[in-house]
Image: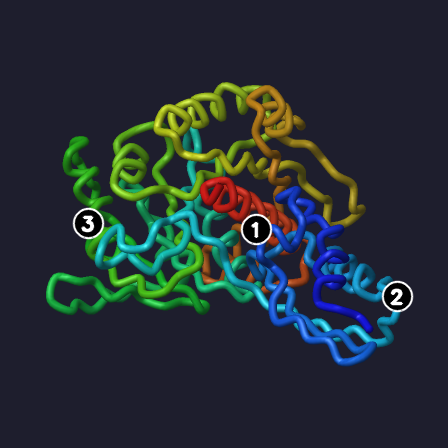
Amino acid sequence: MVSKDEVLDALRSVTDPELHKDLVTLNMVREIQVDGGRVTFTLNLTTPACPLRSKIEQDARNAVASIKGVTTVEMKVGAQVAATHPFGESSVLKNVKNIIAVASGKGGVGKSTVAVNLALALSGSGAKVGILDADIYGPNIPLMMGVNERPAMRGDTIIPLVAHGIKVASLGFFYKDETALVWRGPMVAGAVKQLLTQVDWGDLDYLITDLPPGTGDSGLTLAQTVPLGGVVIVTTPQEAALNIATKAVGMFRKLNVPILGIVENMSYFVCPHCGEKSFIFSSGGGRKASTLLGVQFLGEIPLYPRIREQSDIGVPIVVAAPDSPESLAFKDVAFRVAGMVSMVAYNQSQ
């Protein structure tokens, strides 16, 4: 007769490709039941956006099916997002599992576009997601998410708006688009801290935070106010990308923030008539920067006019055309980010 120990031993042979640990060690195996040759169990993934979900599922099923005497394998698959943010850190953020910053060394690289579509891709996988627009000088998130009303207040607490299924907070909700903010560092830091700690985010698996470009006060404030689960660096393909990415990576390393990886935006343009790729901004800068800096390369986002067009009307491409090549590129990046966050959470637990 098959025993539970045999099932556990078989599943110890299955390794999570991202975390490089077996499923039993990672506590991903639950509720094993054995009835003669029939085995049922639950496989609890570390995130619904697991990048290699199908491989893990198939490997787990095959491992159990290979046990002598097993005739039927019934596997339920769930997901419980691992947390890098310790609960109880503040009364408002206590149920936010992971705070992820999206940053860049300079402006004009499409950082906000990446942040929005990353958040929506994670949400589409089944995770609970919020997005914080901490780009004080150029808050574009309200436009990209198609929301512009002023959020409600409950006492001193801001109730975030909800767009496309995710919670949204931005300083842009509180002043007119044409207003130019002329603020010194302490005012910027105070605004970022207020948005972080006075918004009722509720239960979130991921809070994506869009930072201003550069290495100024917003990033410092964020890292010093809450424990960040990691930062995603957005860059473009040209050779200058190396210098840009190096500055951003260097700042967050000094702040002991895990570097989740580099995303290369505007990687190439695909001609709508002939389908040929054109590398308008050169190629390989993001991948080269990742190699030289020793960080993960999270992927390439192509330069498609439709990405910009959908952002301008408040329906990002991941929502408007979820199966398009552009959306699939964003989803690949999101899955890799989720995998890296799981690695950070696992390393913190050891």
Q: Amino acid at mark 2?
A: Lys
- Picture residue at 59% right of the left edge, 34% below the top: 296
Residue that label 1 marks: 334
Q: How many marks?
A: 3
- Picture residue at 66% right of the left edge, 27% below the top: 284
Between disc 1 and disc 2, the foreground one is: 2
In the image: residue 254, left or right of residue 291 = left
In the image: residue 276, left or right of residue 43 = right
The front one of 184 and 338 is 338
Distance CA(mark 3)–CA(mark 1): 27 Å
Residue 13 % position (x, y): 75, 51
Q: Amino acid at mark 1?
A: Ala
Residue that label 3 marks: 194
Which of the 4 image quadrants contains residue 8? bottom right
Mark 3 vs mark 1: which is more N-terminal? 3
The front one of 223 and 123 is 223
Q: Is residue 288 above or below residue 218?
A: above
What secondary structure is found at the residue carrying circle 3? helix
Mark 2 vs mark 3: which is more N-terminal? 2
The crowding category of the residue bearing disc 2, from other C-alpha atoms within 10 Å (few below 14, some 14 to 19, many at least 20), is: few
What secondary structure is found at the residue carrying circle 2? loop
Residue 292 % position (x, y): 59, 19
Whether residue 326 can be seen here: no
Q: Residue 168 bears which disc, if any? A: none
In the image: residue 36, left or right of residue 152 = right
Residue 232 % position (x, y): 48, 39
